Amino acid sequence: MKPRSRRDTWRLLVLIAPSLFWLLIFFLVPLVMVLVISFGQRGTYGGIVWDFTLSNYARFFDPLYLRIFGRTAGIALATTVICLVGGYPMAYFIATRPPRWRNTLLLLLMIPFWTNFLIRTYAWLLILRDQGLVNMVWTGAVHNLFLHLATAYPAATLFSSLAGLTSVPLELFGTNGAIIVGLVYAWLPDMVLPCYAAIERLDFSLVEAAQDLYANRVKSFLRVVLPLTMPGLVAGSVLVFIPALGAYVTPDLLGGAKSIMIGNVIYSQFMSARDYPFGSAISFVLMAIMLIATLIYFRLGSD
Amino acid sequence: MSEHAVELVRVDKHFGTVVAVDTVSLSIRNGEFYSLLGPSGCGKTTTLRLIAGFEMPTAGQVYIDGELQGETPPYRRPVNTVFQNYALFPHMSVFQNVAFGLEMRHVSKEVIQHSVFEVLEMVQLPGMERRRPGQLSGGQQQRVALARALVNHPKVLLLDEPLGALDLKLRKAMQLELKALQERVGITFIYVTHDQEEALTMSDRIAVMNKGQVLQIGTPEEIYERPASRFVADFIGETNFLEGKVAAVRNGEVAVEIGDALLVYAPLERDAVVGDTVVIAVRPEKISLSTTPEDPRALPGVVREVVYVGTDTRYLAELAGQVTVMVREQNLAEETARRLSAGTAVYVCWQPQSARLLRG
Ligand SMILES: Nc1ncnc2c1ncn2[C@@H]1O[C@H](COP(=O)(O)OP(=O)(O)O)[C@@H](O)[C@H]1O
Ligand SMILES: [Mg+2]
C-alpha cells in the first residue's frame, strides 16, 4: 500500500470516528466492566465485593463446569458440521441456478426467519415433545400400521416387536439431539449465505478447465471448487459455531436438565445465583475460547 | 488411427431459440493447423466446446480420431483446451497447474516432474514453477495455459482466441512461435480467432464462419484469392465491390456493366447469364493506376484521395464520376516512389484473373 499523506490520515479518522465511538460505548466499555467484575467476589446477598481474586476463573475448571463446557462444544461442533453438510450443497444449488432464480431462492431461505426466534423455537417444542407432531405420527399412524401387520401376519414376530416399540413416544424433547435440531434450524442461513457468496463468485470456467484436464466431477469439485470456496465455508462455520457455543434460548426451551449448555450456566449465575463475578468469568473464558478457535480456523482456512 | 483428427457431421447446436451452430461439417486432418475464423458471435467458441465435450450437439455427430463421441464427457476425450481467459487455477502454482492433467491420469511423480519441466522449457517459462498465476504477466499466463494443455500430448489441441488478450507486438511474436511449436510437436491445432490476419498467417486451412454456418473452407491462399462469397471477400482483407449486371458472357469471361457504359471483366467461375445481378470483387493491391491508357480495358478516372500509410500508399479513384475504388500501391525505394496527387486524371486497370465474380 502507498504511504498515506497526513491529510488522508485525517480524512480516514473522521470517517471511522462514528463507528469507533459506537464500538467504544457499546462494546469496549461493557467488556471492560465484565472483565473487572470477573475479578471480584460475590457478596453474601448477591452484589459484588471488590476484592481482587482469580478464584472465579479457577472455579471454571471444576469438573462440573468442564463437563458442561465439553457438551456445549460438542453440540456447537455437531451443529456446525450438520449446517455445513446441509448448507453447502444448498448454497451450491442456489448459486448454480439461472440468475433470475437466485434471489427468489435466497428469499425463500430467509422467509422463515422473519418470524420471531422464540416463536420458531417454540414450534420445534410442539414438534418434538412427547405429544408432539413427530410422536403423534409415531404412536399413531406408524404404530397402527405395525399393529395391523402383526395381526395380518402373526408368524412374523418382527411386526409385533415393532408394534411394541412404536407404542411409546420417542424421547426427542429435552435431549442434545433436540438442541442440535433447534440450533441447526436457527443458524443454517448463516452457513448458506457466505457459502453462496463464495460459490457465486467462483469462475466456473475453472471447473471446465479441470474437466478438460481429465478430472471427473468429484475430482474437479475436490481440487477446484472446494479450495476456491473455502473462505465462504470458513466464514459460515465461524458464523454458526460461535452463536451455537453461546446458545441460551434454544437449550433452555428444547433441552432438559441433562443437556444444559454453558449459556444457561451464565444465565443462571446472573439471574438466579446472583454470582455476577463467576458469570463474568465464564463469559470471558468463553470469549477467549471463541477468539482462539476463530483465529485457528481462519488460519487453517487461508492455507 | 483415423486420417481425420476431428470430424463434425452436420452438427447443430441450439440454445433455446438461438441457433449457435447451424449444420456445420468439418474434416480436420491429423497434424493440421486448422482455424475457425469469423466475427464475434458467429459460433466459433460453441463449435470448439462441442469438440471438447462441454456442449452436446442438438443434432449431428462429432468424431475424434474416428470415434463417435456422443455423450462422452470432457474428461474422457483425448483433447485439451487453451481457454480464452486461460482459466488457470489461481490457488495452484504454475507447476501444479501444469501437472494437473498428468496427476489426474495417475502418471508417476517422477514422470510428472520431468514432463512439467520439459514443457515449461518448451514454452520458455523455466524457473517459474513456484509462482502463482496471479504473479505472472498476461503473456506468461498464456504460456502456462499452453503448457498445461500440451503436457498431456493430446490428440487435438483446442485454442480459443489464445492471443486475444495480448498487445499487438506480443501477439505477432506469439503467432510465429505458436506456429513453430505446432510444427515441432505435430499435434493437430484447432484455432479459434476473429482476426483474419492471424488466421492467414498461421493456418494450414481455414473455415470461415458467419451466423453459425461455415461459409468456406480452404487454405489461406484459396480463401484470400478466391473468396466464395461477398461475406468472405469482405471479412478477409480489403476488397472493392463493384455491383452491376452481366452484359456479356464469352470465352470463359463475363463482362459486367457497373455503371453507365462502364464495363469490367472477370473469369467465369460460376454460372451467370446476361442480365444477372452480380458483384465483382477486386483487391486494392491488384489494381494499378497509370497516367496513360496502356490497357484497352483500362477505365478512365480521377484520383480523389491519397493516403500515405508507410508500407504503401492508398488512393481513392473515381471511375467515370460514378464508382469509387480503392487502390493500394506498395512504396518501393523512396526515390522511385511515385506519388500521384488528388485531382490527377488516371487510367485504372487490373489483370482479368484478379477479379472475382460473386453473387449479387
Ligand atoms: N450457453 C449459451 N446460452 C445461450 N446462448 C449462447 C450460449 N453460448 C453461446 N450462445 C450464443 O450462441 C452464439 C454463438 O456464440 P459463440 O460460440 O460464443 O460465438 P463466438 O465464439 O464466435 O464469438 C451467440 O449468439 C451467443 O450469444
Ligand atoms: Mg468466442
Image (tube, helix red, strand yellow):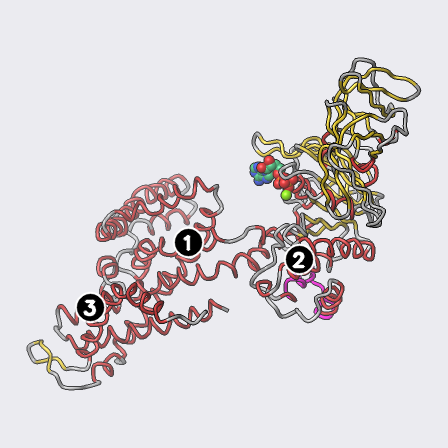
For residue B97: magenta?
yes
Estimate the x, y position of residue A33 in percent, counting from the top left.
18, 75
Judge from the rendering whether residue B20 lies leftward or rightward of residue B172; answer left or right: left
Residue range highlighted in magenta: B96-112
Mark carried by residue B339: none
Judge from the rendering whether residue B235 lies leftward or rightward of residue B41; answer left or right: right
Determine whether A199 is above or below A148 in the image: below
Furthest residue in direction left, as rendered: A45
The residue beneath circle 1 is A87
Judge from the rendering whether residue A49 lies leftward or rightward of residue B189; answer left or right: left
**Quadrant of the image where one finds ligand 1:** top right
Please state which of residues A57 and B18 is positioned toward the viewer in this rendering: B18
Estimate the x, y position of residue A208 in percent, counting from the top left.
61, 50
Q: Kindly check if marks 2 and 1 are in contact, taking CB atoms under 8 A apart as contact.
A: no
Q: What's the amino acid at mark 2? A: Gln
Q: Chain of mark 2?
A: B
For residue A131, say whether it is visible: no
Whole-number angstrom distance, CA of label 3 to CA of label 2: 54 Å
Count of numbered labels shown in the rendering: 3
Please state which of residues A229 and A253 is positioned toward the viewer in this rendering: A229
- How crowded is the residue under tag 1: few (<14 C-alpha within 10 Å), some, or many (20+)? many
In the image, are marks 3 and 1 on the same chain? yes
The residue beneath circle 2 is B142
Q: What's the amino acid at mark 3? A: Ile
Dominant secondary-structure state across the stretch colored magenta: helix
At horizontal 73% and vertical 51% (from top left) the residue drawn is B157
Please state which of residues A220 and B336 is positioned toward the viewer in this rendering: B336
Q: Is mark 3 within 8 Å of ligand 1?
A: no
Mark carried by residue A25: 3
